[in-house]
Every structure is written in C-alpha cells, then in structure tokens.
Amino acid sequence: MVNNDQMDKLFDEARQIALKAYAPYSKFRVGAALLCEDGTVVTGVNVENRSFGMTICAERNAICAAAAKGFRRFLAIAISTPDSIEPVGPCGACRQVMGEFMSGDIPVRFSGNGPKQINTTVGELLPFDSLHELRK
Ligand code: THU
C-alpha cells in the first residue's frame, strides 16, 4: 500500500517533470510519475507533433519508458497538469494502457496548479476492465 507521503512525493516528481513537456501546439504541459514495484520512479511528459494525432501523452510515455526498463508492475501513478487550475484526468487511451499494467486498486492522483486534487484508482477510471479480474 502506498501512503499519503509517498503519493505527495510522487506527485511532486510529476509536477517537476511536467516542465519538460514538449507541448508547443497545445501549450498544455503534462507530467506523469509512475511508482514501480521496487520503489523506482519513472517519469514521462507529453510529446506533441505537428501532425497532431501523433502526440503521445505523459502517462503513456511514462508507462512505455518503465516497460522498456523491464518494469511490469506499478504501485501508483501521479499526473500533473500545471497549465490548468482544475485537475485534468487521463485520456481514454491512457486509461486503457494503465489498465494493461495496473490492477483496479492502484491509486491515481491528478491535479492542476490549483488546490483541488483528485485521488482515485485505476478501477474507477476504467471500470469493468476484465484484465483486472483475470489478474486476481
Ligand atoms: N495530455 C496528456 O499528456 N495526458 C492526458 O491524459 C491528457 C492530455 C496531453 C496531450 C496533448 O499534448 C495535451 O495534453 C493537450 O491535450
């Protein structure tokens, strides 16, 4: 189980890495920090492209980077969107990719640059995902 202090630290990593986002088109930077099973934190940012549909979100970049390092199981993910006051949740594609590697009880925190913070789970973001059940 991940405690609140760990989530605070993870979110701080997401907040810092968001400043490295490549988002010249939307000007909407996103940072994601993934806590791996052994305590390693792997981060990602959104990387846009002039062919807009090729943009890759921060969450998927973090998950792909972690997968390439050999990680397959994660304890938590935090997402920071510093260009929004309100929290902005992960897109549908990212929820699907999160569901590939994280069971329904994995905590997800996301926040903008304002005081509101959403603490939820992969299962709440992607309900009725049978893979969660298969892995039990
Ligand atoms: N974006 C993410 O990185 N993660 C999300 O979950 C939502 C959207 C990025 C994609 C694009 O670069 C910018 O935010 C605006 O949609």
Image (tube, rainbow, N blue to C red):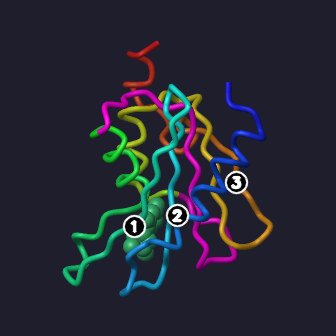
Q: Does the magenta stretch include residue 133?
A: no
The residue under the point 75% across, 72% down is 114
Tell me if label 1 and label 2 are in contact, CB under 8 Å: no
Point out the quarter of the image occupied by ligand 1.
bottom left
Q: Residue 46 carries which label?
A: 1
- Which quadrant holds residue 96? top left
Toward the top, the furthest residue is 136
Tell me if label 1 and label 3 are in contact, CB under 8 Å: no
Labels 1 and 3: the sequence-earlier one:
1
Confirm or reject: label 2 Cβ below 8 Å from ligand 1.
no
Give the percent coordinates (x, y) of residue 132: 44, 24
Viewer-nearest residue: 126 or 79: 79
Confirm or reject: label 1 Cβ below 8 Å from ligand 1.
yes
Please give the range of residues in magenta: 69-89
Viewer-nearest residue: 9 or 27: 9
The residue under the point 69% across, 48% down is 9
The kind of residue on which mark 2 rests is Ile
Q: Which callout, 1 or 3, points to the residue nearer the camera?
A: 1
Which residue carries the number 3 mark? 118
SS at badge 2: helix
Give the percent coordinates (x, y) of residue 12: 66, 57
Name the chief secondary structure element in magenta.
loop
SS at badge 1: loop
SS at badge 3: strand
Q: Which callout, 2 or 3, points to the residue nearer the camera?
A: 2
- Tell me if 93 is positioned left or right of 116 in this view: left
Viewer-nearest residue: 88 or 63: 63
Q: Residue 17 carries which label?
A: 2
Q: Which callout, 1 or 2, points to the residue nearer the camera?
A: 2
Tell me if label 2 and label 3 are in contact, CB under 8 Å: no
